[in-house]
Amino acid sequence: MNKKLCAGLLLIGGAGTALADDSISHTFFFVRPHFQSGSPEREMMFRDDRVNMAEDGCGGTLEIVGYGSATTESCEFAKYFMPFGKTSLNVSEFKANVPSSQLDTDSSKNIEAANFNIATQSATSTFKSTIKFAPKQNVAGIGFAWKQTFWWCEDKPKAWLEVAFPVEHVRNRMRLSELITSTGGSAAIDSITGKTQLGLDGAPVVASMTEAFKQSNWKYGKIDNKKCHSKWGVADVEVKLNWSSVNGDCCNMSGYVGFVIPTGTTINAKQAAYMFNSVVGNNHHWGFLFGGHMDFGIWENDNHAVHMKFDAAGRILAKNNQVRSFDLKDKQWGRFLSVYNSFAQATTANTNFDQFSGTSGINVFTKCVSVSPRYTADSNTALVYTYCNWSAELGYNLYVREAEKICLNKWDETVAIKSVLGDGATSLARNISKNFTGSDLAYDSANFTSSLIKKSDLNLDSASHPAIISNTIYGGLGYDWETCGYPVFLGLGGSYEFSSVNTTTNRWTAWGKLGVSY
């Protein structure tokens, strides 16, 4: 690839980042894993020249890196999960005997509370609140990387094996907050039994969004601020075969191929139970690795030297099956709409004159899907200044990831959107904020059939993580010294990752590393 083409691709990537819009109403967020090939915390002070540092050595080198990171910009992050590009949502409850609650012209209303199994007992007032998300991720880990030469040419390493993996602790929090402006009374009471009214999924109705997001009848998509969503684990193992192609006085070049062994978190039903649950690694995808390293000497004078170093890492990731939630087309947050999961359920509601029964949409619009992340790429450019045993590094990292492709193999056409009036009636137009009772269809078999949600009505893109173009700037300081013929190094570094859109996290990362060549 020539220089003009490379420059053109970088310009296009930068323009795409600048002009793209924030993503909204998505159900799954992918966080770029730490300590992968091409990442600053992995590459700084630990490039291919380390295998030849020990005089009369075995051509091996090892590094141990402790790192930690924390996300910033939680307000933009929240937009990713929320509908309508909002950072806060106004929730209001529909009541048949409160005319003011039935207005679909109220532009301030973002969420119909009945979809979340909220029903209150006041005869004159309805439930109202405002909710916000403030997502946050913290990561702490230790990375291990090892290189061992097995083929020499004229006393210089020609080929070597590399194995690397991090052990991480990942903690994700959605940090739901709710300001209730009208309680509407406590949860509705059944006039016959005197107990809390049963609602969606045959579970008791709730009296707030905080309660709704953690109700036990929800199988997926829950938020519970009191639960600690954190995981420990090995975040994938990389195995690479490296070889030297140019080994000169002022220029060194090498390449590699390899593969990723998924050892991190599997995205199964248990993992999908909570929104933005903690994930260790790369969503359990196998992958093929390829890339290379280039080192150019720019200037040298006595004990001073300046080098330009380039690291490139490409990954082709294999598809796998994961459990994810999805919306309906043109219905942001449609996954939370209340539904009838069958004509039999609508019939029971009609027979019992039941306004509240039905099924929580999140339990229906969450399925096992095929996820293909396709291609990712890291490019790292660094300017390295050395003086005696000291080195200082300043660099820029560009990370690119294709949008995930989501496929749903099977969808049973048995589900219809429930009317807010209940009693077995369905709706053709209802969305998460408006009820449009004028478009309701009264209970009967033909009407239910015409209301059925088809596979073509599903918005599978809402379950996919969009394309990523992220930028990272970093700096580091290190010191090398020889101890009994075994060169040892220490290094400290820090980086900030950012993007103009919310498909990637803005986050700080700091690391310290210790390494030895032998």
Image: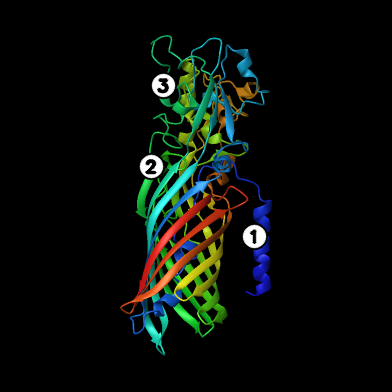
* Residue 330 placement (x, y as % from top left): 63, 37
Q: Which residue is mark 2?
A: 270
Which corner quadrant holds the C terminus?
A: bottom left
Secondary structure of the residue carrying tag 2 is loop
Label 2 packing within 10 angstroms: few (<14), some (14-19), many (20+): few
**Residue at left 50%, top 31%?**
177
- Marks 2 and 3, how far apart in space? 23 Å
> Of discs 1 and 2, which sits in the foreground?
1
Residue where numbered disc 3 is placed: 204
Instruction: Tell me the residue at 47%/56% (across/down).
Output: 319
| Residue 81 visible in the shown view | yes
Of the residues shown, which amino acid type is indicated by label 1? Gly
Q: Position of residue 257 (x, y in %)?
A: 46, 72
Q: Quarter of the image holding residue 238?
A: bottom left
Pick out the residue farthest to the left.
484
Q: Residues within 10 Å of mark 3 (few under 14, many from 20)?
A: many
Give the amino acid type for the residue marked by disc 3 in the picture: Pro
Tell me which residue sits at (50%, 45%) in the image.
Answer: 28
Of the pair 99 and 393, the residue shown nearer to us = 393
Q: Is residue 408 visible?
A: no
Q: Tag on residue 13? A: 1
Q: Secondary structure at mark 1?
A: helix
| Quarter holding residue 187 | top left
Q: CA distance from mark 1 to mark 2?
A: 36 Å
